Amino acid sequence: MRAVLAVLLLLFAAPLVAQESVPPAPYAYRQLDNPAQEARAKALMVTLRCVMCQSQSIADSDAPIAGDMRSEVRTRIAEGEDPEHIRQWLIARYGDYVTYAPQVKPITWPLFAAPLVILVVAAVLLRGRFARGARPGDGDTA
Amino acid sequence: MSGEPQSSRPNLRLGLWLPLLVFAGLFALFVHGLTNPADSNVPSAFVGNPLPQFDLSAATTDRPGLATRAFRTGKPKLLNVFASWCVPCAAEAPQLAALAQAGVEVDGVAIHDKPDDLARFLASNGNPYAAIGRDDRRVVQIAIGSSGVPETYVIDGRGVIRYQHIGDIRPEDVPTLLARVKAAQGGGA
């Protein structure tokens, strides 16, 4: 009985095996052996966007192309390439779309300038209020 | 501002309307965003660059593999990124056949494909390809900024990427692609 069941299970397993296509790229689901390199690869991969499932990083995504991109990134890191260089290589192919870390460019300068502008405005406003508070006579007569 | 006496009436009135204006602005923005869904295609930023160096082995027994040097013949070609497991790829097969019939050489890059599956796909959908390279790790696909299958690139006679078509080629896209190939011929010779 058990043997029959085992044969039956094997029969049902066959289509699953058939679905499995070409084996994934070497480093799609395997970490690099060097932990420092893997950490560098991981830090980069969580900031790279999967071009297929566009709300996930390639570190999170299970899309086949994300696996191939992970393998590409890990292979390059293992060869000693600088993570930012890999990012630029991908940006040259997929545009800024592929990176979650915003690049400093003319179109993104408000993003980086806004916190400074807000701080300066806040400082000016606060200064005005503190000055008024120190001399109650001045501010209220307007 | 609470301690301030009611001295600046015009300012106060403007302040009352401001939230409404902000709301109206956001509302208009959201309506615009909802009625014009964003284009989810990721166009290649690599158009205009020469093809990267690659040398792919043959994906089938009856067609040669594909290497960068095959695109330096002085004649523009189409580079079709496809796979047997991709349904739109089957849908665009007649259009690729029409382009090949019109005299354009079509070279293929087969993504994650097993030779048996590919042979079956070509047997049932036709084989317009002059060469098919086997790209099991999407090395070429990523190197040219392609984000899915099918995609079709116009490569000029010097191996420079001139145009990218994302998705399956519909019958109405054939004239555009032919025009792009012709344009590449003029500029690339």
Image (cartoon, coloured by chain):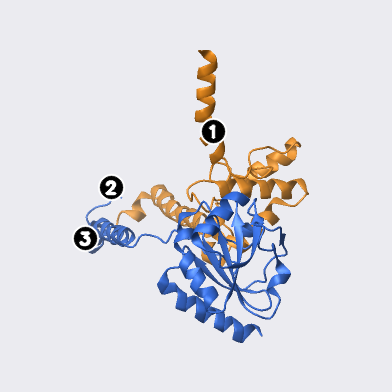
Q: Residue at x 51, y 51 (%)?
A: B85
In the image shown, does B33 or A137 lie closer to the viewer?
B33
Question: x and y percent of residue A135 in the render?
Answer: 39, 50
Give the CA distance from mark 1 to mark 3.
75 Å
Q: Which comes sooner in the sequence, label 2 or label 3? A: 2
Quick check: marks 1 and 2 in contact, CB under 8 Å? no
Locate the C terminus of chain A by quadrant.
Answer: bottom left
Residue occupied by mark 1: A14
Residue picked out by circle 2: B2
Which residue is at 69% across, 45% downward? A74
Residue type, numbered disc 2: Ser
Q: Which is nearer the eye, B4 or B22?
A: B22
Q: Secondary structure at mark 3?
A: helix
Image coordinates of residue B30 in percent, x first then y, are: 31, 57
Left or right: A21 in relation to B28: right
Identify the colour of chain B in the image.
blue
User: SS for tag 1?
Assistant: helix
Image chain in orange: A
Q: Nearer the viewer, residue B116 or A40?
A: B116
Kindly identify which residue carries mark 3.
Answer: B13
Is the residue at mark 1 from the same chain as the one at mark 2? Answer: no
Residue B101 place in picture, x, y as percent: 53, 76
The amino acid marked with disc number 1 is Ala
Q: Quadrant of residue B130?
A: bottom right
User: Does the image show residue A132?
Assistant: yes
